[in-house]
Image (cartoon, rainbow, N blue to C red):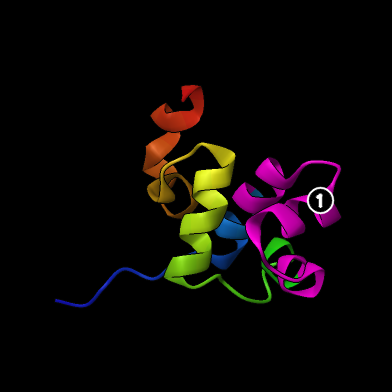
Amino acid sequence: MPSPRINKAYVAERIREVVGDEPKAFAYDVGISISALYNYTKGFQIPGTAILFRIARHAGKPMEWFLDPACEDFDSI
């Protein structure tokens, strides 16, 4: 069974939502470079599992929230 494709634009939108107005501070807190964060927020790249986990943990969201539009109910977490 093929795996579903990940929508880069959706992931980027979610990451931008949690980064807010302080991308440098966010990148530092998560432990990634500002250029990597830029690539994620612009949809040029999708973070790997370990980095997405750190982003999700820092944002207080489950990883699925960044990947699946059906996870809207997690917005209240």
Q: Main secondary structure of the magenta part?
A: helix
- Residue 37, horizontal then vertical, whole percent: 73, 65
Relative vertical location of residue 17 with respect to residue 74 in this rendering, above or below: below
Tell me which amino acid carries mark 1.
Answer: Ala
Please tell me which residue is depicted at 31% across the width and 68% down the height of the picture: 4
Count of labels shown? 1
In the figure, is residue 28 to the left or right of 52?
A: right
**Front position in the image: 19 or 44:** 19
Relative vertical location of residue 22 with respect to residue 73 in this rendering, above or below: below
CA neighbours of label 1 inside 10 A, class few (<14), some (14 to 19), many (20+): few
- Residue 60, horizontal then vertical, whole percent: 51, 36
Relative vertical location of residue 56 with respect to residue 61 in this rendering, above or below: below
In the figure, is residue 21 to the left or right of 42?
A: right
Q: Secondary structure at mark 1?
A: helix
- Residue 39, horizontal then vertical, whole percent: 73, 72
Tell me the residue that label 1 is attached to: 25
| Residue stretch rendered in magenta on the structure | 14-38
